[in-house]
Image (cartoon, rainbow, N blue to C red):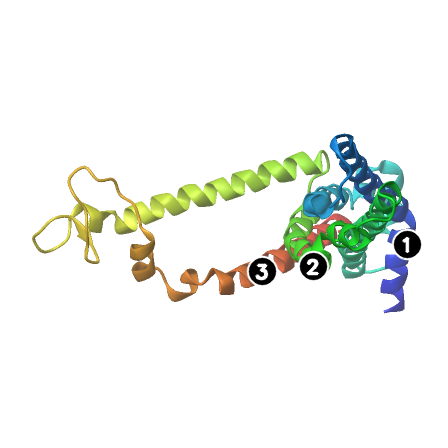
Amino acid sequence: MMRFLHSIRHELTIQYRNILIASGAVAGSMMLLGLLSWLGGVSPINLWDGYQLAMLVIGVLISSGQFGELRSPGHRIAYLLRPSTVWEKVGAKIAVSTLFVWLAVTVSFVLTSLFSALLYMIVAGGAGAGKAFVAAFAGGDWMRMSLVTLRVYLPLNAVFLFGSVYFRKHPVGRTLLSLVGWIASYVVIGAVAVRLIFGRYIEGSYPGAGSARALGFHFGPGESFSVSSEMWHQIAPFYLQRPDIMEPIVTTAVVLGFWLLAVLRLRETEA
């Protein structure tokens, strides 16, 4: 455990400046853009509308650079020979690129929102202080937004962290291209599979007479093949009809799966 904590501390020592600078710069830039709106009249600034996008962009860029040591001849051997296991090395990268990045961005937005509210009070002469603070912190909803953003960010972190250890050059671009190709292949395969499996029911090529139909749904001449929500409710397995149940399961599988792939890839590199 102590060795794992030492690995986290080592990663923080190397990366914390870049993370803090990026977080502060993005939050500050968004506040400056908000101040430009005061040219048309002073009003409270709400920075949290752009929080999720800022968090995802910063997180993806930092996650994609986590294993930059492997692409540097001067640091590659030193990193691979560091006295820690593969699990500890990857675990430290995960801790820094998830929790620390999330905390840095969130705290930057909190401090910047506080400063913008105080600035509004000064400019407005103290009028509407309560309104200013409520607006600056998204009506008190900023904490829920930050937690939701962390949940959305974790799958991206897992995918781009794996891309960082897998691709030796241009990990961001290659991971994005791989992700687009992966999703596109599933869409094409899924469309072809649905057409092959359910097409015969739509076209009427089944025993019996009557117009083309599928599970009681009739289609007139010239109507194209499509699966309506009502038809999907009857032909799809029950678990595919409950996205509220499937979403956390799929998300957890993606996160753990790509983190495990990152461990396996780093172990292969060490070997």
In the picture, measured across the screen, residue 124 lies left or right of residue 155, that is right
The residue pinned by badge 2 equals 147
| First-in-chain label (2 vs 1) | 1
- Circle 2 Cα neighbour tier, 10 Å, few/some/many (<14 / 14–19 / ≥20): few
Residue 49: quadrant of the picture: top right
| Badge 1 amino acid | His
The relative height of residue 76 versus residue 237 in the rendered view (above or below) is above
Q: First in sequence, mark 3 or 2: give its number.
A: 2
Quadrant of the rendered structure where residue 220 is?
top left
Q: Is 187 situated left or right of 60 in this image?
A: left
Confirm or deny contact between disc 2 and disc 1 (CB under 8 A): no
- Look at mark 3 in the image and give the residue it sits on: 253
Task: Tell me if I can see residue 76 in this picture.
Answer: no
Q: Secondary structure at mark 1?
A: helix
Which residue is identified by label 1?
10
Residue type at mark 3? Ala
Rendering coords of residue 87 (x, y %): 76, 60
At 50% across and 65% down in the image, what residue appears?
245
Task: Identify which residue, 257 or 269, lies in the foreground.
Answer: 257
Percent coordinates x, y for residue 131 in the rendering: 76, 52
Between discs 1 and 3, the one toward the N terminus = 1
Q: Could you tell whether 202 is left or right of 129 in the image?
A: left
Judged from the image, the secondary structure of the residue bearing numbered disc 3 is: helix
- Asked whether residue 205 appears in the rendered view, the answer is yes
Q: In which quadrant will I find the N terminus?
A: bottom right
Q: Nearer the viewer, mark 3 or mark 2?
A: 2
Q: Quadrant of residue 252?
A: bottom right
